[in-house]
Image (spheres, grey):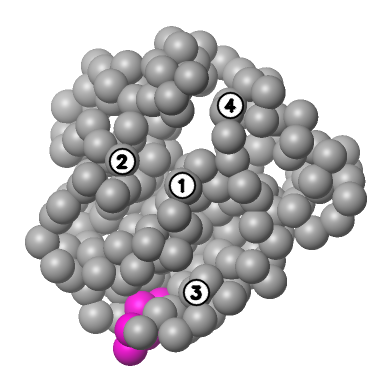
Amino acid sequence: MPNSLIWDFWADKYDRLWVQKYSLGPSRRAVINALAPMLEAGRSYRLLDMGCGTGQLLRELQRAFASDNIEYTGVDISAKMIEQCRRQDSESIYFVADISAFEPAEEAYDFIICSHSFPYYPDKQAAMEKFHHMLKKDGILLMVQASANSLYDSIAMFLVKFTTGKARYLSIKGIMELARCRFDKINIVKIRERFYMPTICLFLFRKGGGL
């Protein structure tokens, strides 16, 4: 089944899934906490959430940074997910597209967030190059993903694939190798609110000089 159809199926159930409590919710809080000190009073920003799902993160960002001047854009491969976004949020801009088909202007965004969708991208190197292309000079990439760094992580993420489709969960080392020459590392934050959850990391990268 194509990934878009899988996520179409989950669209009206997504906000109630058990992973919201122990994975997706903590990930959103980590992104908000990381973004807060980067925002300067009086500046305008453009932010993209690539693989935005039902738009939960963008709505939480709007509430957290209500006094900041931020233009929000969400992109997802699932038309049903984007329907959910637009139903609950009339302020953000939403597109149905995968990362390879989405074509904004070069250096369009100050911040790009990619939360839990990166493992599903078939060409991860091309995705990193696209992020680099879309970010403004010194722009920030905030990428969250489950990271297979141990046998336990690998087993846990293997089981997840039965409900979400084909995915490849890179290790921390694998992500760093992809980012090399394109981005400078700011920080890596491990997110693990329950001991039985696999390793989830928030990678903070600043746009570097390119290839």
Q: CA distance from mark 3 to mark 1?
A: 15 Å
Label 1: few (<14), some (14–19) or many (≥20) C-alpha neighbours in 10 Å? some
Q: Is residue 167 visible?
A: yes
Identify the magenta region.
Answer: 206-210
Q: In the orientation shown, which residue stands out farthest toward the left?
A: 105
Which secondary structure, mark 1?
loop
In the rendered image, which residue does mark 2 sit on? 98
Cα–Cα span, label 4 and label 1 = 13 Å
Up the image or down, 108 lies above or below 81; here it is below
Q: Residue at x 16, y 52 (%)?
A: 103
Q: Nearer the viewer, residue 151 or 186?
A: 151
The residue that disc 4 covers is 164
Identify the element where label 3 is drawn.
helix
Q: Where 18 sits versus 43, above or below?
A: above
Q: Determine which of the numbered discs, if any, sits on residue 121 in the image.
A: 1
Q: Residue at x 84, y 39 (%)?
A: 155
